[in-house]
Amino acid sequence: MKIIGKRSEIDAFLRKLESRNATVDRAITRAVEDILSNVRRNGDAAVLKYTRKFDNRKAARLRVSASEITRAARKADPKIMKAFAISARRIRSFHEMQKERSWSFTEGDTILGQAIRPLKRIGAYIPGGKAAYPSTVLMNVIPAQVAGVKEVAVCVPMPEGYMNPYVMAAIEMLGVTEVYRIGGAQAVAALAYGTKSIPKVDKIVGPGNIYVATAKKMVFGIVDIDMVAGPSEILIIADSSARPSFVAADMLSQAEHDEFASAVLVTDTSMLAAAVSEEIRVRLKQLRRKEIAKASLDAYGAIIVTRNIRDAVNLSNTIAPEHLEVMTRKPIDIVPMIENAGAVFLGPWSPEALGDYSAGPNHTLPTGGTARFSSPLGVYDFYKRSSMLGFTREGFFRLAGVVEAIADVEGLEAHGNTIRVRKEQLLKQKREKQTGRKRA
C-alpha cells in the first residue's frame, strides 16, 4: 500500500478517484439505447431475445412460477436461512422508524398539509446466477413493503437457467411472488416501459453492472430510480488507538469487490500507517480474490497521513465516501464534524460488513462522492407526496392582492385573472344583493 502525505500526492489521488466516474464508453451507451428501443417497440419478444442471447439460450418463459421459487428455495441451507431471517427482522425494525405520515394544519380559515402515499408498483433488480447477493433482496424489498407498496416485481438474471437458492429463498421469505428470469438493460427496459406480460413500474431499484446502471439512468423520467451506483468504497479515519489488523481487514473487505473499488485509510500517525500497510501485505496473500483486491488497492487504494484528526475528517468530507469507519479513542466526538458519508460506523467493533448484512440500516448507499447530496435507500424512497391547500372565501381574500401583484410582475395575465374573476363574481353577488334590498 502506498503511504502519502504531501498535498500534491493527495490531490493526485483525489483526481484518480474522480476518474472512476468518467463518462460511460459510447459503445456501451449505444448498445443500451438499442436494447431500450427494441424492448419499447417489441415488448416480450425483445426481452426473450436478449435473455436467450445473454443469459440462457434455452429460456422459454419470462416469469418464474411459484413452484419454481419454492423448489429452488428448498436447496438453501436452513441454518444460513436462519441468519437471513434475523437480518430481515433487524432491517424491517430499522426501516419501520422511517415511516412518514400525512399531516395538515389550519391557519385561520385555511387548511394546508401534505398527503403521503406509497408508490403503487416498484421493480427490484437483483443480481443472480453464480455471483448472487440475497442480501440485496432484503435491502431493496423490505423498505418498499414497510412503505406500503402493494406490487413488487423482481428481476433476477439466471445464467443457463441457474436459480440461486438463497436469492429464491430470500424472495420467498418476503412473500414476493412476481419474479422474472431476466437481467441486463432488457430487464430495466421491461420494468420502465412495460410489456404484455410485465406491467410497467413506478420506480426501479437495485444494483447491476454498467449496462444496468446506464439503462437506469436513461429511463429516469419515465420512471423513478433509486440511484446510479458506482464501485464500492470505504474510508477509515483512525488514530493511534486503532488496531492495524482491524483496519487492514476492513479495507480488504471492500477491495475484494472489484478492481474499481476503493479502500482508503486516513490517519494522523505514521506508525499506524506503516503497520496497516504491512498487515495488508500479509493478509492479501491469504485471500481467494487476492488478484482483484490487489488491483483495487494499486489503482484506488491509499494510506494518507494527515497532521491531525480534524484534517482527516476534512479530507473524508471532500471524498464523501460510501462507507466511513471511525476508529478513534472517542469516535462519537467525531460525528458532529462529519458532513458527507453514506453510512458511518463508529468504533473498532462496527465493521462495515455488519452494515452490509445484518445491522439494520440499508446497504444501498451513495457512491462516487454523491453522499454530498444523496442518502441511503430507505422507506422515504417509496413514498410520493402531494401538497394540500384549502381556502375559504375569507382566506382567499387575504392572499388575493399578494397573488395578483406577483402575477403582474411575472407577466402572467391568466394567473392574475384566476384571482380577478373570483373577486368580480363576489362583487357581482354583492351588487345583486344590494339591488334586491332596495327593491324590497
Image (cartoon, grey):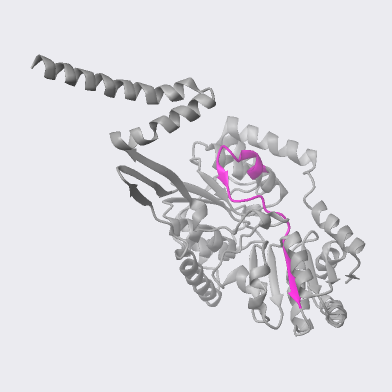
Residue bounds of the magenta highlight:
215-238
| Horizontal relation, residue 341 to residue 114: left or right | right
Residue at 22% in and 18% down? 431
Residue nearer the viewer, 21 or 197: 21
Q: In the picture shown, does residue 122 fall above or below 173?
A: above
Question: In the image, residue 113 lies at what x, y percent?
Answer: 38, 47
- The answer to whether residue 234 is magenta is yes
Looking at the rendered image, the quarter that the N terminus falls into is bottom right
Looking at the rendered image, the quarter that the C terminus falls into is top left
Q: Residue 301's image quarter?
A: bottom right
Which residue is most to the top? Answer: 439
Which residue is most to the front? Answer: 438
Q: In the picture shown, does residue 172 fall above or below 210?
A: below
Residue at 47% in and 71% down? 89
Q: In the picture shown, does residue 418 fall above or below 161?
A: above
Residue at 50% in and 43% down? 201
Question: Is there any visible trace of residue 256 in the rendered image?
Answer: no
Question: In the image, residue 274 lies at what x, y percent?
Answer: 88, 80
Q: Residue 207's image quarter?
A: bottom right
Question: In the image, residue 429 lies at what x, y percent?
Answer: 23, 21
- The answer to whether residue 265 is magenta is no
Residue nearer the viewer, 386 or 124: 386
Question: Is there any visible trace of residue 238 in the rendered image?
Answer: yes
